[in-house]
Image: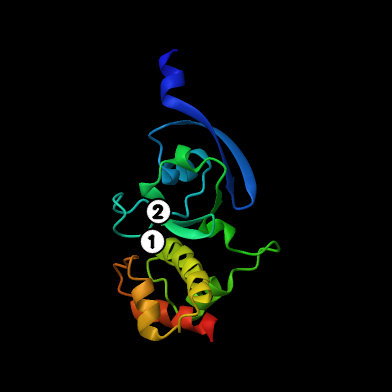
Amino acid sequence: MDGQEATHSQVTLHVNGERHALDLDHRTTLLDALRERLDLTGAKKGCDHGQCGACTVLVDGRRLNSCLLLAVAHDGAQVTTVEGLADEDGRPHPLQEAFVARDALQCGFCTPGQLCSAVGMLAELAADGAEATREAVAERLSGNLCRCGAYPRIVDAVRDVIT
């Protein structure tokens, strides 16, 4: 066995509906694979410790911090990034439209993670049958930080899509 075999693996990721076969170092995070190998730079490298949520993507429908995930552990996974939220005709996701309408994106750095988190949260709310009160939405999105302080408008935008 040479060093290459011990540290790399072939991984297949289905990102935004497209299959990608990658040869990855075992230490490669999903975030780095998306950004550096697939040129999908929507998910941001913020804190790189899973504390800010800027790197949030959907993995098999669940919202996760991609900076904390080893890509090789997600071989075969379905990954959706902010680039994959628009529909097949390129129309923005209703949440993307609501963020624009509510000016809920200020500097925009956290917006891709906020959007992916909100999409996942809406699915969680539907599955839980939980009421989407303003407080519930804010609490469920609390893992995503916004340095501009656009939280009220982000919550308003999400609630616009719910109602």
Hey, which residue is sitting farthest front in the picture? 128
Please name the residue that numbered disc 2 is placed on: 44
Q: Amino acid at mark 1?
A: Phe
Which image quarter is the N terminus in? top left
> Where in the figure is residue 114, as x and y percent of width and height?
42, 66
Whether 83 is drawn above or below 125: the answer is above
Please name the residue that numbered disc 1 is placed on: 109
> Where in the figure is residue 141, as x and y percent of width and height?
38, 71
Under circle 1, the secondary element is loop
Q: Is residue 92 left or right of residue 23?
A: right
Residue 75: which numbered mark, if any?
A: none
Q: Amino acid at mark 2?
A: Lys
Within-10-Å neighbours for mark 1: few <14, some 14–19, many 20+: some
Which image quarter is the C terminus in? bottom right
> Where in the figure is residue 37, as x and y percent of width and height?
50, 38
Under circle 2, the secondary element is loop
Marks 2 and 1: in contact by CB < 8 Å?
yes
Hey, which residue is sitting farthest top in the picture? 1
Taking the spot 34% from the left edge, 75% from the top edge, the residue there is 139
Taking the spot 42% from the left edge, 71% from the top edge, the residue there is 105
Whether 49 is drawn above or below 104: the answer is above
Taking the spot 46% from the left edge, 40% from the top edge, the residue there is 73
Give the CA separation, mark 1 to mark 2. 7 Å
